[in-house]
Amino acid sequence: MIFYNLIGLIISLSFLIWGADKFIDNSSLIAKKLGLSELTIGLTIVALGTSAPEIFVGISSVLNGTESIAMGAVVGSNISNIALIFGVSCIGVSMLPSKTNPIQFIPFVLAVIVLGLGLQDLKITKAESIEFLFVFAAFMYVTYLFRIPDKIDESDNSNIKTGKTILLLILGLLALIVGSNYAVINAEKIATIINIPQVIIGLTIIAIGTSLPELAATISAIIKNKNDMVIGNVIGSNVMNIALVVPI
């Protein structure tokens, strides 16, 4: 049984890597087409796409009455984003990203503060959930307000096929979601077979598993020298984990 789960895990990771590659490529093309910076795209589209597994884990946990697993996944995933993914990006980045207005980091700091205050009584109320959603709205507004336009090269844009780009972007996102979902499922089954407690699974395997899209997207972006997208992905994904998954 564990052999089949290992094969499933490898296949899922293959989907994940392929999806990340297509997602990064076509997000960058959209950035060029719209004249937006890769940082802005990383903070929004890529961050939302790579946070999709955490969102689905949150919904599934609520439906199954295991909200603690979702909360463990959020905390563990954010630690993984900063310690693993940002660490990998610091090793792999070959050039400095563009200068970022410090105001863009305020929603991230707010999200961490609100989460810390909310967890003091080990309970997230509906009122606190609304506060998280306000933080998310502030994050999106600040990202839009301080977006840095890229220099538009008309000769490059003329070669961009919008329909094909959007199709590949959607396929890449679907591959990310499906690949990460089955990677988590197979990893969880392997952990169950070797008798690892469910709480540990939530804090480690599920948390790291749902961070796999960020890791795959980060490695792909580093290879393609899209360093602004790497930074945007890490920050945006952490904010969305707190400001979207926790309220759910």
Image (tube, grey):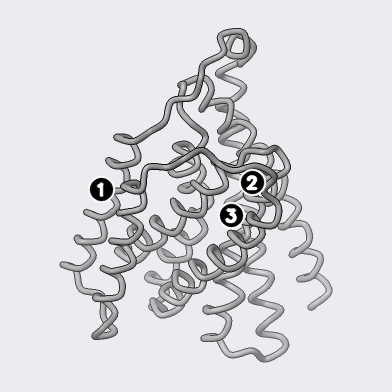
Residue 195 placement (x, y as % from top left): 67, 91
Foreground mark, 1 or 2, reads 1
In percent of width and height, residue 91 lies at 69, 57
Q: Is residue 98 visible?
A: yes
Tag 1's secondary structure?
helix
- Residue furthest to the left in view is 127
Distance, label 1 to label 2, CA atoms, is: 30 Å
The quarter of the picture where the C terminus appears is bottom left
Q: Nearer the viewer, residue 227 or 73?
A: 227
First reached walking from the N terminus: tag 1 or tag 2: 1
**Percent x, y for residue 34?**
46, 21
Mark 3, other Cα within 10 Å: few <14 / some 14–19 / many ≥20? many
Q: Which residue bears the numbered disc 3?
A: 214
Residue type at mark 3: give it: Glu
Q: How many marks?
A: 3
Q: In the image, what residue type sits under mark 2? A: Ala
Residue 2: % across, % down = 79, 78
Q: Amino acid at mark 1?
A: Ala
Residue 138, numbered label: 1
Report how far apart the C-alphas of labels 3 and 2 lie in the structure.
Answer: 13 Å
Q: Residues within 10 Å of mark 2 (few under 14, many from 20)?
A: many
Provide the residue designation for mark 2: 175
Which of pointers 3 and 2 lies earlier in the amino acid sequence? 2
Q: Is label 2 in a helix, a strand or a loop?
A: helix
